[in-house]
């Protein structure tokens, strides 16, 4: 059973930065594609960013492009989401997700098999 544990959420002022981490309990992390999704109050879960198992391919939602950076360290079985220039609209619970897969970047929630418990990010004005 794959377990994902997010950390790094918190309260930050608009314009600030946070780095989220996602630690995975897998033997070979590089065989898992990873994504970040978020869910704001009263809204549906939405795609934020995704990265291939090797880390060479990434994709971002338009709302975060240029501000967020997804990365991973396969030697540490950990993925990251660096969030800069945060806005109040970025307030949400952020989830990391993983699926054992290669090939094209996966950005749909239903393509992911494993999910973390979420970490809350609150951006104040």
Image (spheres, helix red, strand yellow):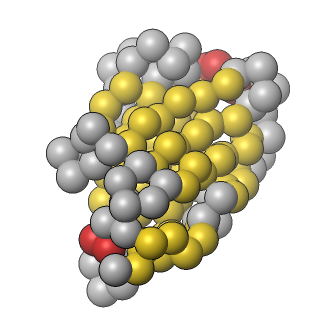
As displayed, is residue 43 above or below residue 69? below
Residue 82: x %, y % from top left: 50, 43
The residue lying toward the viewer, choosing from 1 and 89, is 89
Q: Residue at x 74, y 50 (%)?
A: 3
Q: Residue at x 36, y 33 (%)?
A: 106
On the question of residue 94 being in view, the answer is: yes
As displayed, is residue 56 above or below residue 98? above
Residue 73: x %, y % from top left: 67, 25
As displayed, is residue 33 above or below residue 124? above
Q: Is residue 29 left or right of residue 55?
A: right
Q: Residue at x 45, y 72 (%)?
A: 13
As displayed, is residue 37 above or below residue 69? below
What residue occupies the far bottom of the structure in this picture? Answer: 42
What residue occupies the far left of the structure in this picture? Answer: 62
Residue 31 location, quadrant: top right
- Total labels drawn: 0
Q: Is residue 125 left or right of residue 94?
A: left
The residue lying toward the viewer, choosing from 56 and 98, is 56
Residue 53: x %, y % from top left: 54, 21
On the question of residue 113 being in view, the answer is: no
Q: Is residue 103 left or right of residue 21?
A: left
Q: Is residue 91 left or right of residue 117?
A: left
The residue lying toward the viewer, choosing from 69 and 117, is 69
Q: Residue at x 45, y 29 (%)?
A: 51
What is the quadrant of the C terminus in the image? bottom left
Residue 20: x %, y % from top left: 59, 51
């Amino acid at each position: 059973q794959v377990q994902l544990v997010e950390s790094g959420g918190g309260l930050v002022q608009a314009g600030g930065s946070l780095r989220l981490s996602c630690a995975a309990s897998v033997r070979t992390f590089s065989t898992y594609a990873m994504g970040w999704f978020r869910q704001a109050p009263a809204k549906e879960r939405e795609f934020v960013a995704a990265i291939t198992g090797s880390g060479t391919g990434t994709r971002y939602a338009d709302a975060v492009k240029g501000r967020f950076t997804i990365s991973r360290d396969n030697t540490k079985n950990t993925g990251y989401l660096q969030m800069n220039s945060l806005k109040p609209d970025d307030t949400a619970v952020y989830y990391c997700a993983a699926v054992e897969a290669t090939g094209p970047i996966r950005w749909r929630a239903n393509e992911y098999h494993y999910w973390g418990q979420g970490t809350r990010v609150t951006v104040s004005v």
